Image (spheres, grey):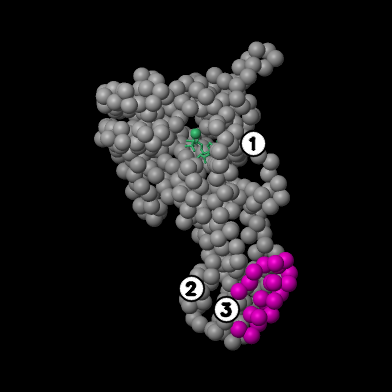
């Protein structure tokens, strides 16, 4: 469990601010939930034969003798709240929450006992469009944080409980043939939850796992169609992914689409954001049948990637000032000085040697700046400047020159204006 101090606390603030802003820009509303839930909730949702429930939960009896657990993840609590508050009556819901999660894991870099997640959930929508939306939200966030080059997307479909049962039988048959070679955990799971063997991180089992029957070969038609729908939408959005037939996720409640954003920059801990569909969970926990999909995002790992990105381009300018036309070229050096003066350490690179709009923007992009500030003769006349974000799809904005440094500072901090 970590204290977060000094520069780290500032970095957290930035990352939390950006993440909230991106999530809310997709129309998701914030909810707050208790840290404690009845232990039973996690048994019934995450599943009894999972790492989390078997060995990672902080569980205790309170003064009434009720068994309570510090939440190890967010989705179970969101579903409990959805049911308890009758939210299904209000139509489809897009919800998010964030905060600490607790798992008694073996501590190591990137794996903590109190860690923090964003949990983003879309309830009551069954089509592939919403799966794609959640994935696109992740992609937009990585871009916004400047870590999109560190993350790749893995995708799979788990099908329905029925198609999975057929697969499970085939997998169990296969794994029985290797019973002696399995480790204790896997042997035990063979009887109770064989798909969890595929999720094993024991390198000694890699060959056995690689040779196992593959889930996508057992998908039912409707799940196949749904999965094709997700893929088409990702293709249309230009979001690249790798199909990973062995991605089964460590929690029992998933069905159909599952995905994971992974990185190779954080050592053994490669998952930054993981999610999928859980169409059966609301009903299973006593609510009205409601399709749902969501993801959990590990904040520590996201912050670590942002820190690495900062370290690698720590001296890059933050602003590239482009000037077009004689009047603008004459004024640009003054505006650059003003930005450096008022911007408290703002790193501003001023275009030199003229060039077309396109050429100047190309330089701006290459130098690593977060923003291009564009000054044309028009802007000189009105006392304004155009600010174009270079690392996100956000729209460009026109800002009074007198407000420019504050505006850019705010944007760099990730606060909404
Ligand atoms: P892993 O494979 O790393 O154990 P997981 O499958 O247990 O991850 P989820 O339960 O899906 O993870 O949680 C979602 C995200 O929360 C993960 O992608 C990861 O970024 C983060 N996370 C999970 N456990 C921890 C932990 N102990 N410390 C820090 N971050 C964590
Ligand atoms: Mg885990």
Looking at this rendering, what residue extends furthest in the top direction? 65
**Tag 2 and tag 1, C-beta contact below 8 Å:** no
Magenta residue span: 329-349
Q: Residue at x 29, y 26 (%)?
A: 178
Q: Residue at x 33, y 39 (%)?
A: 245
Say above or below: 217 vs 144. Answer: above
> In the image, is residue 117 part of the stretch drawn in magenta?
no
Say which residue label 3 marks: 351
Give the quarter of the image for residue 30: top right
Say which residue label 2 marks: 362
Helix, strand or loop at disc 3? loop
> In the image, is residue 339 part of the stretch drawn in magenta?
yes
Q: Residue at x 61, y 50 (%)?
A: 15
Is residue 381 among the parts visible in the rendering? no
- Judge by depth and name the residue closer to the eye, 4 or 253: 4
Q: Position of residue 73 (x, y in %)?
A: 55, 32
């Amino acid at each position: 469990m970590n204290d977060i101090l000094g520069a780290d606390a500032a970095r957290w603030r930035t990352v939390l601010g950006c993440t909230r802003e991106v999530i809310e820009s997709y129309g998701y509303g914030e909810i707050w939930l208790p840290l404690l839930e009845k232990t039973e909730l996690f048994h019934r949702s995450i599943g009894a034969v999972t790492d989390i429930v078997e060995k990672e939960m902080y569980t205790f009896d309170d003064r009434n003798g009720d068994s309570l657990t510090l939440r190890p993840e967010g989705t179970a609590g969101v579903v409990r709240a959805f049911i308890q508050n009758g939210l299904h009556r209000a139509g489809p819901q897009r919800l998010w929450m964030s905060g600490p999660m607790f798992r008694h894991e073996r501590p190591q870099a990137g794996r903590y006992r109190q860690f923090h997640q964003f949990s983003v959930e879309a309830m009551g929508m069954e089509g592939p469009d919403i799966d794609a939306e959640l994935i696109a939200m992740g992609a937009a966030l990585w871009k916004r944080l400047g870590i999109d080059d560190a993350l790749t997307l893995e995708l799979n479909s788990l099908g329905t409980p029925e198609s999975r049962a057929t697969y499970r039988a085939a997998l169990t048959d296969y794994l029985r043939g290797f019973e002696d070679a399995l480790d204790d955990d896997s042997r035990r799971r063979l009887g109770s939850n064989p798909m969890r063997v595929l999720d094993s991180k024991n390198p000694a089992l890699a060959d056995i796992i690689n040779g196992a029957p593959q889930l996508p070969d057992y998908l039912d038609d409707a799940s196949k169609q749904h999965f094709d729908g997700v893929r088409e939408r990702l293709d249309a959005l230009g979001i690249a992914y790798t199909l990973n037939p062995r991605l089964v996720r460590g929690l029992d409640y998933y069905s159909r689409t599952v995905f994971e954003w992974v990185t190779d920059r954080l050592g053994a801990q490669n998952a930054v954001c993981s999610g999928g569909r859980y169409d059966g969970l609301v009903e299973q926990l006593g609510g009205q049948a409601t399709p749902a999909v969501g993801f959990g995002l590990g904040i520590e790992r996201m912050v670590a990637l942002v820190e690495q990105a900062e370290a690698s381009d720590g001296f890059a300018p933050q602003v590239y000032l482009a000037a077009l036309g004689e009047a603008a070229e004459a004024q640009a050096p003054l505006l650059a000085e003003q930005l450096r003066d008022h911007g408290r350490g703002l790193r501003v690179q001023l275009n030199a040697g003229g060039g077309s709009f396109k050429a100047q923007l190309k330089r701006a992009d290459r130098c690593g700046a977060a923003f291009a500030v564009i000054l044309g003769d028009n802007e000189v006349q009105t006392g304004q400047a155009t600010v174009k974000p270079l690392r996100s799809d956000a729209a460009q904005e026109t800002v009074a020159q007198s407000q420019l440094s504050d505006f850019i500072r705010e944007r760099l901090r990730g606060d909404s204006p």
